[in-house]
Amino acid sequence: MHVYGGEDRIVAIAKGNAMEIAFERAGKPVKGYVLKEDEGHGFGKLENRVENYKKILDFHKIQFGQ
């Protein structure tokens, strides 16, 4: 799962997108994508952190079972 902040000054979204393409070419497609335009490197807003952690938990349930 890829998580991005639109205002990230540490890792540009283009770098993450390139990594996603590399995963797909390797036969390991990315199974989730989150973009929050109003966040930087790491989510600071509580509502965005809660949403992100819920998606991570859902991803883990799918990958590893409950």
Image: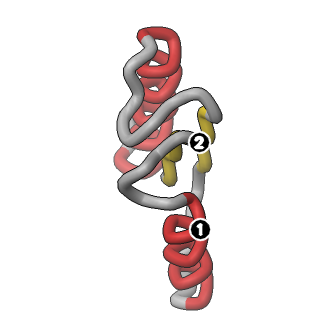
Horizontal relation, residue 64 to residue 37: left or right: left
User: Residue 34, located in which quarter of the rendered image?
Assistant: top right
Q: How dense is the environment of label 1, judged by Cα within 10 Å: few (below 14), some, or many (20 and up)?
A: few
The vertical placement of 38 against 41, above or below, is above
Q: Position of residue 10 (x, y in %)?
A: 36, 54
Q: Which mark is residue 24?
A: none
Q: CA distance from mark 2 to mark 1?
A: 11 Å
Q: Position of residue 63 (x, y in %)?
A: 42, 51
Residue under label 2? 6
Residue reaching furthest bottom?
A: 25
The vertical placement of 1 against 21, above or below, is above
Residue drawn at x 47%, y 28% as measured from the top left? 52
Residue drawn at x 56%, y 59% as measured from the top left? 13
Residue sitting nearer the eye, 44 or 34 = 44
Indicate the quadrant containing the C terminus: top left, top right, bottom left or bottom right. Answer: top left
Label 2 sits on a secondary structure element that is loop
Label 1 sits on a secondary structure element that is helix
The vertical placement of 49 against 17, above or below, is above
Residue drawn at x 50%, y 60% as measured from the top left? 12
Q: Earlier in the sequence, mark 2 or mark 1?
A: 2
Identify residue type, mark 1.
Ala
Residue drawn at x 38%, y 20% as measured from the top left? 44
The vertical placement of 11 against 65, above or below, is below
Residue under label 1? 14
Horizontal relation, residue 24 to residue 15: left or right: right
Q: How dense is the environment of label 2, judged by Cα within 10 Å: few (below 14), some, or many (20 and up)?
A: some
Identify residue type, mark 2.
Gly
